[in-house]
Image: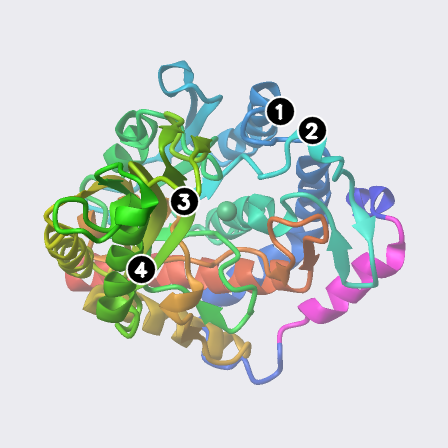
Amino acid sequence: MRAAKVLAPAALLAALLVANVLPAHAAGLSPAERRLVASVDRNVPSHLALLRRLVEQNSGTLNFAGVRAVGAMLQPEWEALGFRVRWVDGAAWNRAGHLLAERPGRRGAPVVVLVGHLDTVFEPSSGFTGWTVLSDTTVRGPGITDMKGGDVIQLLAVRALRDAGLLDGLTIRVVLTGDEERSGSPQALARADLVAAAAGASAVLGFEDGDGALQRAITARRGSSDWKLRVRGTPAHSSQIFRADIGPGAIFEAARVLAEVRDSLAGEPYLTFNPGFVLGGSDVVLDSSSAGGSASGKTNVVADTAYVTGDLRTLSRAQLEHARAVMTRIAARHDARTDAVFTFADGYPVLEPSEGNRRLLALFDRASVDLGFGAIEAVDPMRAGAADVSFVGDRVPMTLDALGLKGDGGHTSSEWADLRALPIQGKRVAVLLARLAAGAARSTGATGH
Ligand SMILES: [Zn+2]
């Protein structure tokens, strides 16, 4: 209870501990699982204190020293649980780096990967700082749900397994990236450690906050990638536009392409296509970032060049390929006096819905119901953006995300958490992990504890 002192007001902790009492109808738990619950209850105060320290340390993605400081706070926590921990420097992808932790289980134990991130969207210049108690159970702070709360829930759950003597039933790998919010480049290098950790794993658990709802988790995430449309026209006096040898010019042709793409793709479920930026005229320069540039033109000159940039979000790789093919075909039907070409850049991959992901959700749901915390359903993928688990979802049989702390206002200076979710998620994840271990032990005929 030493930690209670740092948590003013004391009412916050008292409310949490009341919320922590195991519901009387949590009858579906084994004796070992009840030990998990008791451990989480015991450890909430110290983990709440840790969460506060993490939130009070700025770790905007580009604040490398801050990201490293958050890693340095988490390193001894994992070491205390018997994990081998190492910091991987991120200079090669121009970011702070990642914290990796691993503890091998007994021979043949299934491998589970826990994914978190150390960074937040709040650089020191954002001015959003501190731990502000809003009520007995809610606190506002930068990164509290996205996702320092999730990083702490990982520890709470794994510590419970240790306390219950169940830790050897799994090989656990923890990957805490330092650049989830602004991925380093080259991206393949920035995510190489995450991909390596997933090798041979049977499940990946992500600790994002998801849509903020305590009764939902994520089994599918849309991927996002960028596109660029470049259109060239035949410059001429405006009075001659549409003449057979001049055509409509670059801006009209770009408008035709966009309108046809909209007509072709706008109704497709889970697919979105958004032009976010356009430049056009006689003298046009697009920045190398494709997010800015300069353009000049005259009202009486047919436009020479137009650029449009935007993004594309899909729920499967097949849907992405289909959308790109449609866009390419529409551009290729350009007016004879113009030229129109789409180029595509790979962005965040999709986490495709799968039978395995649904099975893992069912296990999580079962754990929650047995704990007396109610049913869990899947987040609508329209509400689930790209995140780190998407890089490994196609490499493992089962992936589930949004096991982190819950609240609202993520990526804004009103980000707040409902701290009652901390013990609830800690217990759900602990029971899920114990059952993944026990299930594997049963299916291989090994004896458990
Ligand atoms: Zn996040």
The residue that appears at 28% across and 73% down in the rendered structure is 269
Q: Which residue is mark 3?
A: 278
x and y percent of residue 134 in the render?
83, 58
Amino acid at the residue labelled 2: Pro
Range of magenta residues: 8-22
Amino acid at the residue labelled 1: Gly
Between marks 4 and 2, how big is the CA–CA gap? 40 Å
Earlier-in-chain disc, 2 versus 3: 2
| Image mark for residue 66 | 1
Between marks 3 and 1, how big is the CA–CA gap? 36 Å
Q: Nearer the viewer, residue 253 or 85?
A: 253
Between marks 4 and 3, how big is the CA–CA gap? 50 Å
Q: Residues within 10 Å of mark 1 (few under 14, many from 20)?
A: many
Q: Which residue is mark 2?
A: 124
Is residue 21 on the magenta stretch? yes
Judged from the image, the secondary structure of the residue bearing numbered disc 4 is: helix
